[in-house]
Image (cartoon, grey):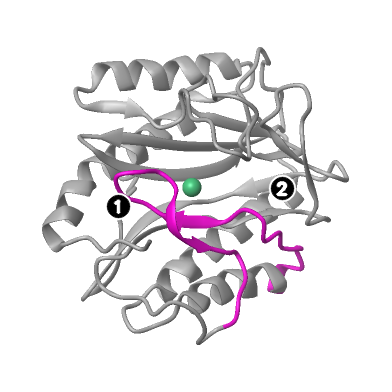
Amino acid sequence: MIELKTPKEIEEMKPAGRFVGGILRDLKEFTKVGTNLLEIDEFVHKRIVDRKGAESCYVDYAPDFGTGPFAHYICISVNDAVLHGVPFDYNLKDGDLVSLDLAINVDGWVADSAISFVVGEHKDPEDLRLIKCTEEALEAGIAAAQPGNRLGDVSAAVGDVAREYGYPINLEFGGHGVGRIMHGDPHVPNDGRAHHGYKLRSGLVIAIEPWFLKTTDEIYQDPKDGWTLKSSDGSRGAHSEHTIAITDNGPVILTVRDK
Ligand code: MG
């Protein structure tokens, strides 16, 4: 069921959004060549512990697309991993492409956001192009999230950017409604038909999350951890996500990352 929030509820969701956005901003600074993925996880754990009213959405989360309860505070997907990456004992290397996906509940409201970046000196231009594509697709999706438009307009805007860049699109995982829980209705696919689908209205809060792989739309679940989704051909992936609220004045990004 799709739930709409009142303007007051959208205001109440903003602290969660700023908290998640601020952690991702700080993690982009913190994460360098040599940083261990478990240190990143611990960084998030500490921030949650220090914040009254904050609770991880990931710890003990056990949806049907994962294997058993998730046991970490953040998803970290490196190189050919793109979604649901389980942090493990690994020191990042020069040129690694890192995707961080973070959802936290603050005072009963969830915010969900993701960023991708390359660590170190040797950044492959092809990796930067892939990241830029997900960021532009996210911007285009947000711009289309206007009251009166259709959900398909958001999906088509995202998909059009991927097509412009020439990246394949996977439709199994995409954006979703956000509110009291992390994954609510509606599903927001990363491609669709403009002017079709659910009519967007003020009060709808959704995560829009373009993620693309360079040369395939096929993924598989890493049997080592039962969660991490990797590209079937070993090509790298990137992911950009914001939680946004649709208001009478247009879309508002809740997971802002400014100081
Ligand atoms: Mg999400």
Residue 254 is tagged as 1
Does the rendering let one see residue 147? Answer: yes
Q: Sort mark 1 into few (<14), some (14-19) or many (20+) by Cα contacts within 10 Å.
A: many
Q: Which of label 1 and label 2 is nearer to you?
A: 1
Give the extent of the magenta segment: 164-193
Under mark 2, the amino acid is: Asp
Asked if residue 54 is positioned above or below residue 22 in the image, the reply reads above
Asked if residue 46 is positioned above or below residue 113 in the image, the reply reads above
Does the rendering let one see residue 208? Answer: no
Q: Is mark 2 within 8 Å of ligand 1?
A: no
Under mark 1, the amino acid is: Leu
Q: Main secondary structure of the magenta part?
A: loop
Name the residue nearer the viewer: 3 or 129. Answer: 3
| Left or right: where 235 falls relative to 9 | right
Image quarter where the C terminus lies is top left
Residue sitting at x 35%, y 15%: 46
Residue 127 is tagged as 2
Q: Quadrant of residue 117?
A: top right
Name the residue nearer the viewer: 57 or 93. Answer: 57
Image quarter where the N terminus lies is bottom left
Q: Are marks 1 and 2 in contact (CB under 8 Å)?
A: no
Q: Residue furthest right?
A: 233
Q: CA distance from mark 1 to mark 2?
A: 27 Å
Label 2 SS: helix
Q: Give the x, y percent position of residue 94.
A: 71, 27
Label 1 SS: loop
Q: Give the x, y percent position of residue 165.
A: 71, 68
